[in-house]
Image (cartoon, rainbow, N blue to C red):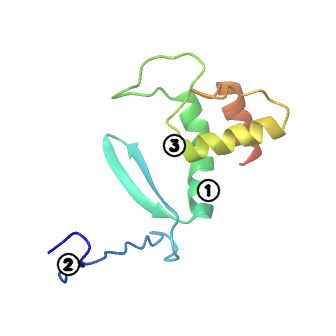
Amino acid sequence: MTHHEKDPMARRVHVQLIDDISGEDAQETLRFSLDGADYEIDLTAANASELRAAMAPFRYQGRRVGRGSGSRSGTTGSTGPEETHKIREWATANGYSPRSRGSISRVIRKAYEDAHA
């Protein structure tokens, strides 16, 4: 069989995320830890935002632990590239001057979370 012929045994797998709270189509999977246990939950954008807002005051006062935690001043919790991009866009539109690369300052992150709480 040449590489141009289709394999009759090929299959396509479609993964559909379902919000573990509402049962609606989910847009993302969030990971978090509590009391030494790690959790993963699929959520709609609205429910993910609600979870982030509920956890924000605790994240800001907490310390990161584990792989890559370090004690870099001026940074808080882990943020994925999409969220980091959203924060930078929001910060620029709201009079802040975020760095174009690297971590987002604690001041900007807190302002963003406060605006979205």
Residue at image mark 3: 80
| Dot label at residue 50 | 1
> Depth check: 36 or 2 in front?
2
Q: Hey, what amino acid is under mark 3?
A: Gly
Percent position (x, y) of residue 87?
A: 68, 40
Count residues near mark 3 (Cα–Cα under 10 Å), then give few for <14, some for 14-19, many for 20+: few
> Depth check: 27 or 85 in front?
85
> Depth check: 28 or 38 in front?
28
How much space separates mark 3 and mark 2, taking CA atoms?
37 Å
> Depth check: 66 or 11 in front?
11
Residue at image mark 2: 7
How much space separates mark 3 and mark 1, taking CA atoms?
17 Å
Residue drawn at x 59%, y 62% as measured from the top left: 45
Please tell me whether mark 1 sits on a helix, a strand or a loop: helix
Q: Is residue 102 above or below residue 23?
A: above
Percent position (x, y) of residue 53?
A: 63, 48
Count residues near mark 2 (Cα–Cα under 10 Å), then give few for <14, some for 14-19, many for 20+: few
Percent position (x, y) of residue 116?
A: 72, 48
Front disc: 3 or 1:
3
